[in-house]
Image (spheres, rainbow, N blue to C red):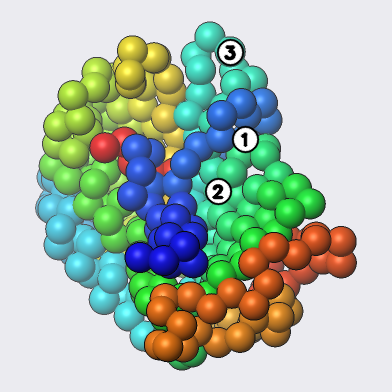
Amino acid sequence: MDGHAVLVFVALVALAGCGAAPLGGNTPDDPTETLTPVPVSTETPTSTPGERPPGVTPSGTVDAARLRTAHESFLDGRSYEWRLVYDLQDPEDPTAVEGFTRRVFVDDDRFFVEQRDGDRPVVHSLFVDETGGYLRRVDGNETTTETTLDPGVATDYAVGGGLIERFLTGMNTDVNTTERDGETYYRLHATGTPPPALRRLGTAVSDYRVTAYVSLEGFVRTLVVRYDRVWNENREGVYLRVDYSGVGTTSVEEPDWVDELDPPTPSAGTSTPRDARVPNDTSTPEETSTPTPTPPATPS
């Protein structure tokens, strides 16, 4: 693997996730900014004994694999925006938070990923269309760009299905209904024993709480997970939230910075950077033509 290919691989791993955090992104070393969790809902849920989404039994037990299948089937062929917030908090210092946020905009085979690492001035971006993948990393005043013929698919980055199965498997939930934006959702809520995926980690997990808002078709619009754990001899609180929006209405435009790059070609291996390092004096991470709507990894 040549040097360019290594750079591409590292950038894709940082975005798609093969690390020690829940989705695979690396958390910052010295974060100080506290990320404020968004309230799940201010509405009063209504108890419902009737129908249930796929994979949810009348007693509230969740077959997460079946629910995941229904969720992914619902999204198949639809555009959407996916947003993840992942925080690790020191219980003895509420201001000490590590984590990242990721947004993924999906429209058929075209998608755009943006990941921000806590309060550090680091932004990873990936735009993918039929010509390949275009990577950009902004760290302060330094910008690095790469291209790749094998960027993967949108669900390598918008990993909602995997998180549904990871955090809801085997859960016995209380089921209620609530209205959100004029739609009826089933609110699944459980506390206590964590799912098998967390118990297999060899960590001490406590105070596990999970809440999901699910349509009758099985579309999991929101998933919120909180728990405490002892990880590498450190005690920390974990907060993870996933939200979907813009279903069927999201469009993905090519960012302006992609114009500066040549499309990847097989003869160039896995990457053909046109300007691997360029001064960041004319643009900011926010300057893309991609819509900006309201969008770290599970421990391993």
Q: Is residue 255 left or right of residue 151?
A: right
Write the residue at 56% across / 29% down: 29
Label 1 is placed on what type of residue? Leu
Earlier-in-chain disc, 1 versus 2: 1
Write the residue at 75% across / 64% down: 278
Expressed as whole percent of the image width and height from the top left, the position of residue 282 reads: 87, 67
Residue receiving disc 3: 93
Asked if one can make out residue 217 in the rendered structure from this viewpoint, the answer is no
Label 2 is placed on what type of residue? Thr
Q: Nearer the viewer, residue 17 or 195?
A: 17
- Disc 3 is placed on an element classified as strand
Expressed as whole percent of the image width and height from the top left, the position of residue 213 reads: 38, 53
Q: Is residue 268 above or below residue 284?
A: below
- Disc 1 is placed on an element classified as loop
Residue receiving disc 1: 35
Label 3 is placed on what type of residue? Asp
The quadrant in which the C terminus is found is: top left
Asked if one can make out residue 52 in the rendered structure from this viewpoint, the answer is yes
* Residues at discs 1 and 2 in contact (Cβ within 8 Å): yes
Q: Is residue 17 left or right of residue 4?
A: left
Earlier-in-chain disc, 3 versus 1: 1
Write the residue at 70% across / 84% down: 259
Residue receiving disc 2: 101
Q: Residue furthest right?
A: 282
Expressed as whole percent of the image width and height from the top left, the position of residue 39 reads: 56, 40
